[in-house]
Amino acid sequence: MTGCAWLNSLRGSSSWLAVEDLETAHPKVVALIPAYNEESSIAKVVVLTRKYVDKVIVCDDGSSDSTAEIASSLGADVLRHQKNMGKGQSLRDLFTQAARLGPDTVVTLDADGQHDPNEIPRLVAAVVGGADVAVGSRNPDEIPRTRRLGNKALTQVSMTGVSDTQSGFRAYSGRRIGELVPNEMGMGVDTEILVRARDRGMKVVSVPITVSYAGDTSTYNPVYHGFDVMLSTIKQLSIRHPLMFYGIPGLLSLVVAAGLWWSTLEHLVHHATLETNITLVAAAATLVGFLLLSVSVILWVLISVVRDSRR
């Protein structure tokens, strides 16, 4: 399929404005770069990245500056969104295009200069060596303290077994990339991809990398970023582990309710009066407990049916 034909197939979606002529050859290594208003750094990132890969594809996520023009002039293929749609949508579109090209390895990195393209061979080597996903793991000492604490918390909550879940510098096996196309629109996409990889039994490894935070390298508000990622991580856990996510709080709520009902009964027996406040709290805890348990079972059944239908 030619670049124009592929573009025509996407005209029905408002996500797409234009795409440069995308070749359909089968490159060995493809680099994917989501970008939003990164005209000050995109040139260096593209130039250095092209030294180590066969093709660079940049997704310009509705930038108001010259990000797309600069990337295109330096030899990168460019996907363009009409408006800013988030990192998740950018990676979704990039992954979809990479799967069409059929590369051996796919590399993702940020456009803000935070990652060093000279370390691409290290990540690619991990995939060539048998890993399905290689995550660039940043040295905690190189990360600003506020980001370090947030990253550690998010990594623990995600339960993916990866030491740096929020690192966007990664390499993927080309034959598995189609299985990892994300659904998240926002910044929680990095966690979602790792959860997908774990659920599909992929081999995920961490590879030490360096990182640069010289200047203001992020176009996202750190508070919004952290909140978005946390909500996404919680959503992923609730979907993939409903019995644990909803069932455990439900059981705890019923245990508390049982204790309150016992206290209410004792007071009734000894004083012949009903403690209204405790009784109301006990009734509420009972209702919440049964509701959470019901939700956990229903979601578990539905998710099991969906998973079985995909096999």
Image: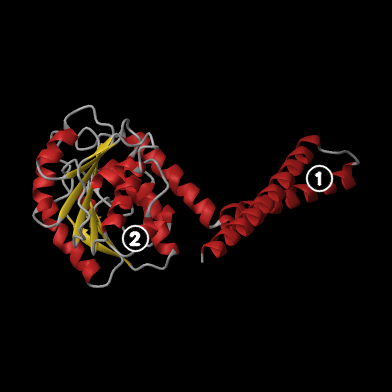
Q: Nearer the viewer, mark 2 or mark 1?
A: 2
Q: Tell me, for residue 264, which label it has, or none.
A: 1
Q: Residue at x 41, y 45 (%)?
A: 184
Residue 258 as seen in the image, left or right of residue 159: right
| Place of residue 169 in the rendered image (x, y in percent of width and height, measured from the top left) | 24, 53
Dot 2, how many residues are within 10 Å of its Cα: few (below 14), some (14-19), or many (20+)?
some
Q: Residue furthest top?
A: 64
Please indicate, yes or no, whether residue 122 appears anywhere in the rendered image: yes
Residue at 24% in and 67% down: 127
* Residue 256 seen in the figure: no
Specify whether 40 is left or right of 282: left
Residue 231: where, in percent of width, then height?
45, 42
Residue plotted at (77% across, 42% down) = 283
Residue at disc 2, secondary structure: loop
- State the image coordinates of residue 186 (x, y, percent, origin top left): 38, 40
Which of the two residues, 171 or 227, is positioned nearer the viewer here?
171
Label disc, if present, on residue 162 of the rendered structure: 2
Q: Residues within 10 Å of mark 1 (few under 14, many from 20)?
A: some
